[in-house]
Amino acid sequence: MAWIKRGLITLVVLFILFAGVIAWFLSGLDANQYKSKIVQLAADQGVALTLDGDIGWQLWPNIALKLDGVKVAPLALPRESLLEADRMAVGVALMPLLDKRIEAKEIVLLSPQVALTVDKNGKGNWELITDAIEAKAEQDAKAQRETPPTLDIPKEDAPASGGLELALEQLRLENGVLRYTDKQAGSEYAINKLNISADNLVPGGKPGDIRLKAELAGSGFPEPVNLDIHSSLAIDEGLNGLRVQPANIRLTGAQGAEAEINLRGNVRRAKADAPWQIQLNLNMDVNPLTGWLAAVGSAYTPQSTDALKKLHIEADISGTDKQMNLEPLQLALDSNTFSGSASYQAGDVPSVSLTLKGGDLNVDDYLPPPVATPEQSELNADVAAAQPVPLPLESMRGFNAKLDLTLDKLHALDFDIDKPQLAVNVNNGLYQLNKLAAGLYGGTLNSTGVFNARGNSARGELSGGLTGVEISKVQEALFASDEPETANQKKVTLSGKTDLTWVGQTSGADTLALQKNLRAAVQMNAAELALAPFNLEKGMCQLVSYAEKTTLPEKEWPAQTRLQDLRASVNLNGDVAKVEGINAGIENIALTGDGTVNLEQQDFDFALGLALVGEKTSGNGCSVQNDRWRNRPLPLRCNAKFSEAGATTCKPDSRRLDDLIRDELKYKAEKKYGDKVEQKTEELKDKLKDKFKGLFNRGEKEEPTP
């Protein structure tokens, strides 16, 4: 056993001698000879590099160049450091040192701190460095163009001189901090506890292992978000390619929010000046989305507790650093699945495109919960205090986009929409609605339009039609009142199948201007339509029974009127809709007229004419004995607030009652008095006029005639 002891002692002695030789050798190799050159090279590029200490040697655990107190700042502002590090160590290979060459094998950064700042004018402090580097490059290129060419004479091989080479095998960054402050936007973000370790970053070598951990915090994050990246990475020869085999990115936030992203593929270029070619596969899972909303400071909560639970995305990414395509693209939001493609193209005006096809989607599940209906006084106060909202015209410009969305079924705002299709193109502020189509309550919708946001105010145009739809649902969607309904309220409604066509336009720089400047024309056609709570046949019978001095039939009059073959034109001017050219049939009654609907005042006013075209108004209606009452429009006026409309809303129209009375009296006077018609007509006119005014109030409380 003695020989083992002597062998160990010999090895220790040899190790000490070897270490002593290295120490003696390094003591004669002054690394500080590179200090001034490094500082000057940095200054030539517009960078102020400060090395507070000497460049020394570290012998353990590896031989390394040691730099203390490293600071990097713009040359124009040397005291405003972008980067500070307590210590930087550059590990070197031993054998090249024997040839007076420094070959970097490892880099270690201890407690580096990076501070990026955007001033109130939107200028970043790092731009001082990048601008200086670009200016230096332009200056060198100009000097090279102006320098006369020289004759290259081959030289004899000279012994290699000492220099610095990089063959990085390891990179370690410990306890780093990166802060980003935007004084213009008033926001601040930070990456804390940044730790990076990387092995085998030698170009052309075997894949290396990279690990990054950090904590993300900022003005928009109530609590920090943890980031963990683990990847196998290979670098191609000449730094012209990266192979990800794969990369796993994990994010964890507040309330159990987790996100995991997996990337596999490569990024390559044929040569140094060629564009990068991208081939990657993306697989991402996010859950729950509500947790991530809370992590970024949002209090949004969907109606359904099953909504915004999970998101899954799969895609193949291909293209270049200027244009990328995601195809095929598979997306799953909770139980909703979509397939399609997406693309992005850089340039002066960036462009994005998204095409998706999906199944059934219930949008109501993702809307916020309904709030309690406010009291009338609170509602009036809210409406009075409402201010126009300016349109974000600047944000609506500066990009191109294309959206093509197709679903099997969409449920939104209590509407069931079959096979909706939406196709929109955006061209630097010009929004073109190429297609809006759907099956809507038994009918079909088709519409196109354009919205121009390129100027100081926007201008929009829309045209289209609804075929065979339930008009009550259209009324509810377009003319719904924000006022709370009372228990005894009789709402004015239209029901039945109808066809609508429209064309409209508007302009303005805010929401109020768009509403006030809205001009639209709507054409309505319906075979069968019901109007409630009015019964126009009853009103006609009241007129006839009084004129013929007959008894009004005793029957139950329904609180509605069925209209046949209705045709009408509606012109919308801001908040006022003018209804013109009304033509319809009510059993044996021909209806004509016009009117207005004021959406802001929530009231309506219609002047109608009812003309009998038979002996009876209907099969079980009232009889008409006098031929003079047939085919003769009898005037009615229907006007009231939406909330006050009822069975007595339609009454004799005092505006046209004088003409009716004059014609009837003139006819009777001619038969009785012959040449003295005019005199007798005026005598009888005033006597009978008051009786006509109370025509519809028999048996009811007397009401003043409008």
Image (tube, rainbow, N blue to C red):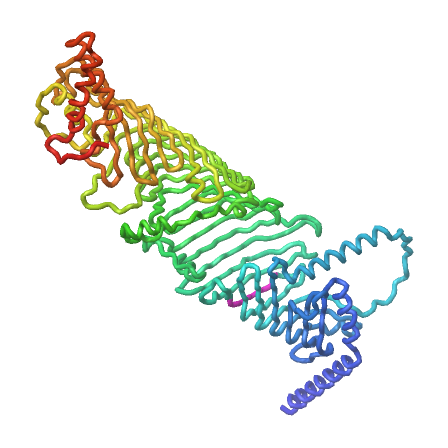
Q: Is 165 in the magenta?
A: no
> Residue 477, percent across and down?
33, 39
Farthest top residue in view: 674
Q: How many marks overall?
A: 0
The residue closer to the viewer here, 427 or 88, is 427
The quarter of the image holding the N terminus is bottom right
> Residue 6, percent across and down?
67, 90
Q: Relative to 564, does residue 77 appear above or below in the rendering? A: below
> Residue 202, percent across and down?
67, 63
> Residue at horizontal 69%, vertical 76%?
66
Tell me which secondary structure the magenta stretch mostly adopts.
Answer: strand
The quarter of the displayed image where residue 85 is located? bottom right
> Residue at horizontal 66%, vertical 80%?
60
Q: Where are the magenta residues, as a range?
A: 207-215
The residue closer to the viewer here, 599 or 56, is 599
Farthest bottom residue in view: 2
> Residue 476, percent across and down?
30, 39
The quarter of the displayed image where residue 264 is located? bottom right
